[in-house]
Amino acid sequence: MLGTAMSGPAAGGAPDGENVQRSPARRNARKGPVTLLRRTLSKAWSGNIFSESAEAAFWQTLSLPPLLLGLLGSVGFMGDWFGPRIVQAIHDQILGFSDKIFNDSVVTQIIEPTVDDILTTGKGEIVSVGFLISLWAGSSAMSSFVDAITVAHGQYGVRNEVWQRVFALLLYLAGLVLVVIGLPVIAIGPDLLPEFFPPSWQPTISLWIGALYYPTLGVLIVLALATLYKLALPRKLPWHRGLPGAALAMVVFLLSSVALRFYISWITTTGYTYGALATPIAFLLFTFFIGLAIVGGAYFNSAIQELWPASPTRRQRRKWRRLEMERANVRMRAEEGRRLWERTTMPLRRPRRADPRRSTDSPVGDSPPDDAAAEEREPEPHRPGGEPPGRPEPDRSGDDPDQPDRRAEQRSEHR
């Protein structure tokens, strides 16, 4: 009684219903930003994110020159359509955008000479050769990103390896088509876009374009990354599930590029230099941080999926329902086959009855069981006096069968 009273509400204990209601709240409280950050770092470290980023950086560096040959070589043909002014605007916009991301040495020694050479010569052989070379290198860079995303979500090996490489090539081709279509619009920039509108609208359009040009470009990159996160997975998640990782990748890349620019500027002022290797090393570092941002965004999405699993999409529900129906049909067919086998083999599996007329001199292996023999044996008749059945009955006439006939001897003596 005392224990019951102390365990009641008067002793300060909460009712069982409140404990049941608080347990989900406590579980949800544990799934906070700190848990998400810890889970992301743990998964990224166990997944060897630095090696995956280095691999992606190598393939990005290898694919950049042929990619520029394939893209900008085709832009060189646009001078006949849009005029030399558009081509010069594309040239200036590409260099200005690169200057905001990379440092001065990378822009002046790698990007600017390559862009100048390609935009001034729009030859068909440059486009074809550069495009064919960039197919292999660019698809390898895309394949490294696809592999890293599938590893982050624990889905590596679900898709066939050959098909995954072909799939990466198809993604690369789709990206090339989108870049070729959007490159003139992006490269024109906020200075030339207002000229396509009426003169009365140009001041307002110029103000809006100047304020929203780069944010819109950043949003487009985030949407493209979210699409990549969705398409790379064999077991796809909803598209909006890739947005957090894409936004994180964009922020990480911007911060890392700013930090890398400050680091390169500082190390240049100290007099410590890598000589002729300074520019390639700086470019490799930039591509490494690009890979780090994209792969890190994939691990962030994976951690979110583990803590807050996404509900299945309509397509997945239809697929699972179809699979369940197929499995049910397989089970029904197996059950029907088992029942048919039992019906057809019943005479063969029926136990044989013992034959009561079998002779006792049959072989040992053919003798009936003990129970059947006991049932077939006739009962012994009841004998008076409780004498055992095996003992012979005494001679009631007084004759002893074991002794000679004394009556015959007496008759012979009397004669």
Image (cartoon, rainbow, N blue to C red):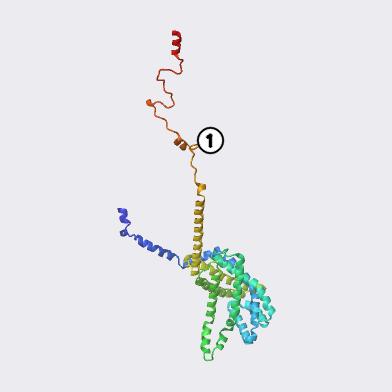
Q: Quadrant of residue 77?
A: bottom right
Q: Is residue 328 above or below residue 394?
A: below
Q: Residue at x 67, y 83 (%)?
A: 120
Residue lying farthest bottom? 200
Residue 49 pos. (x, y %): 57, 66
Residue lying farthest right? 125
In-image side of 107 versus 355 (left or right): right
In-image side of 82 versus 209 (left or right): right
Per the image, label 1 sits on a secondary structure element best described as helix
- Count of labels in the image: 1
**Tag 1: amino acid:** Val
287 and 333: which is toward the camera: 333
User: Is residue 304 visible in the rendered structure shown here?
Assistant: no
10 Å crowding of disc 1: few (<14), some (14-19), many (20+): few
Residue 221 pos. (x, y %): 55, 76
Residue 129 pos. (x, y %): 68, 76
User: Is residue 179 visible in the rendered structure shown here?
Assistant: yes
Q: Which residue is mark 1?
A: 364
What is the quadrant of the C terminus in the image? top left
Q: Is residue 159 above or below residue 189?
A: above
Residue 223 pos. (x, y %): 53, 75
354 and 364: which is toward the camera: 354
In-image side of 11 versus 265 (left or right): left
Residue lying farthest front? 415
Q: Residue at x 50, y 56 (%)?
A: 336
